[in-house]
Amino acid sequence: MASAVARTLRDVVDFPEPGVIFKDITPVLADPELLRRCVAALAAPFANQVDLVAAIEARGFILGAPVAVALGAGFIPVRKAGKLPRPTVAETYQLEYGTAAVEVHEDALQPGQRVLVVDDVIATGGTVEASLRLVHRLGGTVVGVAALCELSQLGGRARMAPLEPRVLLTL
């Protein structure tokens, strides 16, 4: 699986700013068999353990929704600040050049519900860490983190300890 994802991902140099190499997952999404296999592989370790999948805007939604369907679970969109229409709870996280925030509806989950957090790429881990805090604030239990790939040199995994993210490709 990892080799197929690695062959299919596309690097976009200097996006969104100079010096950044953006990992474009759209070629993976365009391959129906590879997408099916990725969704199945992300979901499999969490079978019968998840009530809800919380996926992070925006590319995490693309993977998180089918993972939720595969698990027979509900879906929580973790959105950038100001995008949800009803009352929310928010968590901020650090960027290289400032801070940002993610939000969920304040009634997104019930205390004790088991939640899997899904994103496309784990880089510095800031958005995932903020999403974990949101789940905990609302009384949920995080059962795991899953992502298509991880940029290991950026150290994001450490921000999720003691969880061990399920990642299909480590770069």
Image (cartoon, helix red, strand yellow):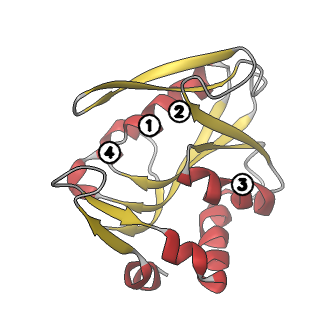
Q: Earlier in the sequence, mark 3 or mark 4?
A: 3
Q: Residue at x 56, y 52 (%)?
A: 60
Could you give the CA–CA distance between mark 2 and mark 4, rounded to whole angstroms? 13 Å
Q: Secondary structure at mark 2?
A: helix
Q: Residue at x 66, y 17 (%)?
A: 88
Is the residue 117 above or below the residue 37 in the image? Answer: above
Residue 61 in percent (x, y) is at 63, 51
Residue type marked 3: Ala
Q: Earlier in the sequence, mark 4 or mark 1?
A: 1
Identify the residue position indicated by label 3 in the image: 65
Relative to residue 44, is residue 156 drawn left or right? left
Q: Are marks 3 and 4 in contact (CB under 8 Å)?
A: no
Could you give the CA–CA distance between mark 4 and mark 1, rounded to whole angstroms? 10 Å
Q: Secondary structure at mark 1?
A: helix
Residue 39 in percent (x, y) is at 64, 68
Residue 6 in percent (x, y) is at 38, 79
**Disc 3: CA contacts within 10 A as few (<14), some (14-19) or many (>=20):** many
Residue type marked 2: Ser
Q: Residue at x 42, y 63 (%)?
A: 149
Could you give the CA–CA distance between mark 3 and mark 2, rounded to whole angstroms? 16 Å
Identify the residue position indicated by label 2 in the image: 131
Relative to residue 86, is residue 78 drawn left or right? left
Single out the mark in the foreground, 3 or 4: 3
Q: Are marks 1 and 2 in contact (CB under 8 Å)?
A: yes
Q: Earlier in the sequence, mark 2 or mark 4?
A: 2
Q: Secondary structure at mark 4?
A: helix
| Tag of residue 165 | none
- Does residue 161 show up? no
| Tag of residue 127 | 1
**Disc 2: CA contacts within 10 A as few (<14), some (14-19) or many (>=20):** many
Q: Where is residue 8, by image quadrant?
A: bottom left
Identify the residue position indicated by label 4 in the image: 156
